Amino acid sequence: MCGIAGTYLWPDGGPLTERLTKTLAHRGPDGSGQYRHAAGAGEVHLGHRRLSIIDLSETGAQPMVADGLALTYNGELYNAPELRAELESAGVRFRGTSDTEVLLRAFRRWGTGCLPRLRGMFAFAVFDERTGELTLARDQLGIKPLFLVRRGGGVVFASELKALAGELGDTLRIDEAALVASLLYYWVPDGRCAFREAEKLPPGTWLRLRPDGRSEAGRFFSLAEVAAEGEAIARDPARRPDLHAVVEESTRKHLLADVPVATFLSGGLDSSYLTALAARHQPGISAYTIGFRAEDAKFEAMPDDLRYARQVARRFGVRLHEIEIAPQVQELLPRMTYHLDEPIGDPAAINTFLICSAAREAGVKVMLSGMGADELFAGYRKHLANLIGLRYQRIPGVLRRPVRAAVDALPVATARRGYRSVRFAKRFLSFAELPEETAFRRSYTMYDHDELAGLLNPDLASTVDDVLTEHADTYHDNTLTDFVNRMCLADARLFLPGLNLAYTDRSSMAASTEVRVPFVDVEVVRAAFSFPGSRKIAGRQGKAVLKQAAERVLPPEIVYRPKGLFSAPLRAWMSRDLAPLVREVVNDGELVRSGFLRREALQRLVDEDASGRQDRSKHLWHVLTLEYWYRSATQGAS
């Protein structure tokens, strides 16, 4: 795992690449390198910051140059040993043992045809000295980031947007539509970028730039196609894979490293399953878990995940490290906003950063995470809730109306404690009677159409419509007939790369730590869509097929425990630690003063949350993250 940057046919590209690379030092504290070469009428410059994971010697250093190719690469290839053996059988000779060299030799032999063969997470740039062409590529599922700005026939790219914004800030304009989208979702979807001139290379694609200024793009992986192929397999039980075997193989491959590897262990199904499998192959492996201040957990009505994590650790001989999260959130908030690149309003980013920081201090560079299982196997409450919503709509309206009135009258919290069941009930009734796509979107986004439009400057009303249309277009852009798998596909295309993988990458790399996600593996994804929705949600059990697979190693009390949370006690933070900051943002924040947000609408959110009538803690947390991001972006551009 590393940081990459570079320029192609860009004025003063050498000094710019050097500065970009320096900004990414936290992604690779173990070494740095730079490459320069003439490219037609201009030059190409590649920069690299190294976090040494595989082949710690100089033979793994980057940018790597061989066979007329120069490569700067961020990621890990878990099938590098197999690719290496195939290349060696064809007469290719290797200098070292790094997966970087495997990728470089594979690209020389197969060009972009090598991309479908790669199993791992990656973003890279490769320059061909013979043709003068630069090719950028990003992994199938968007695990690793790659930001770029194109002008004329040139390009500048980097692993993080902050590097580009820091150097090009005077010429980059904030994309207000991206900020509107971030308010809806509490993150910026992968198809948008917070600055208009910047873009994210889409997952599963490549971009080639030529010295004559022309460019060419291609796609080597399509989630919609994989899901459609899986639906055909799902109709025939005999063709479905052994899910446990697929997950175990992926976990084993993700342990490939020349440095210590540890796991996240929340005590929930996904992290417990991966930790148990990892312990089979690396006995005595370390795991890291989190706990919260008792008063915060009570106010938030959070489950006691810690006792389950301890149980798993004892059972499988895992060395458990417990971290209590009682952070100075006022100090961490601006720091996390900086590292996250774009306004991302999920406080789980703080958890990831603190866990990875603790692991790094203990000498751990690589962590395994259960990220992705909920999206692919319908494990979120929203998946079950949307199914229940279809049944709820069949209840006569005369019976539904008094239910809604009763739930509306209930408080989500009192002065001393919160009520999760009431919060869930209010959330459910906010979408239960809506059409399918609208209901699914509303089940995990922050506002409905009118609420979002009412929060914003009236001039942005058409932008709200555009953002909602984008969600509908993505949701319907497939041939699936299975409702549950349609939700899973939408999550894998929107929720996973836009939020969870994004904050995981940026938060972990801020602590110079690599996080690997065995569930977000091309073979696990193919397996996931090979099961019908009825095997994913059975009765009131989400992730049913994954739970059946996990029963082969985990005890039932772990497999079938209530769903845990990898989140933070937001209501406690908002009512205590962050209350003064919320008042400041409402009364004198840049978003309000600029006219982007309406003060009266924002104050209404604050009042509803303070009274306990509604849970607006997540809304307000995201407003704080957006405010800090906006301040930084506008000050940088001034």
Image (cartoon, rainbow, N blue to C red):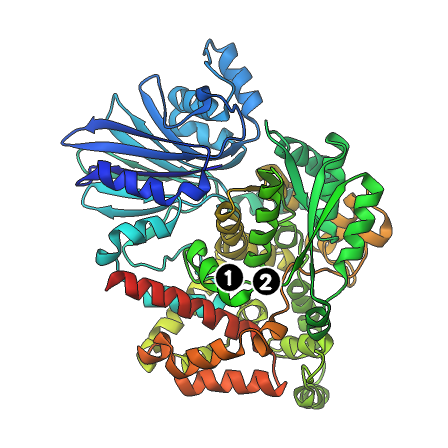
Q: Can you identify the residue that label 1 sits on?
A: 332
Q: Is there any visible trace of residue 371 in the rendered image?
A: yes
Q: Tell me where residue 441 sits by quadrant.
A: bottom right
Question: Measured from the top left, where is residue 452 in percent x and y?
Answer: 45, 77
Question: Measured from the top left, where is residue 451 in percent x and y?
Answer: 47, 81
The residue lying at 55 percent from left, 57 percent from top is: 349
Dots 2 and 1: beta carbons under 8 Å?
yes
User: In the rendered structure, which amino acid carries the disc numbered 1?
Assistant: Leu
Query: What secondary structure is marked by label 1?
Result: helix
In the figure, is residue 284 to the left or right of 606? right
Q: If the image is split into quadrants, where does the C terminus sit? A: bottom left
Question: Does 453 appear above or below 471?
Answer: below
**How many residues crowd mark 2 within 10 Å: few (<14), some (14–19), many (20+)?**
some
Query: What secondary structure is marked by label 2?
Result: loop
User: In the rendered structure, which amino acid carries the disc numbered 2?
Assistant: Pro
In the figure, is residue 553 to the left or right of 69? right
Label total for image: 2
Q: Is there any visible trace of residue 239 in the rendered image?
A: no
Question: Measured from the top left, where is residue 54 in percent x and y?
Answer: 54, 27
The residue lying at 71 percent from left, 91 percent from top is: 402
Question: Measured from the top left, where is residue 488 in percent x and y?
Answer: 60, 55
Q: Can you identify the residue that label 2 sits on?
A: 327
Q: Earlier in the sequence, mark 2 or mark 1?
A: 2
In the figure, is residue 599 to the left or right of 417? left
- Mark identifier at residue 396: none
Q: Tell me where residue 636 sits by quadrant.
A: bottom left
Compute the Cα span from label 2 to label 1. 7 Å
The residue lying at 58 percent from left, 82 percent from top is: 609
Residue most toward the top? 91
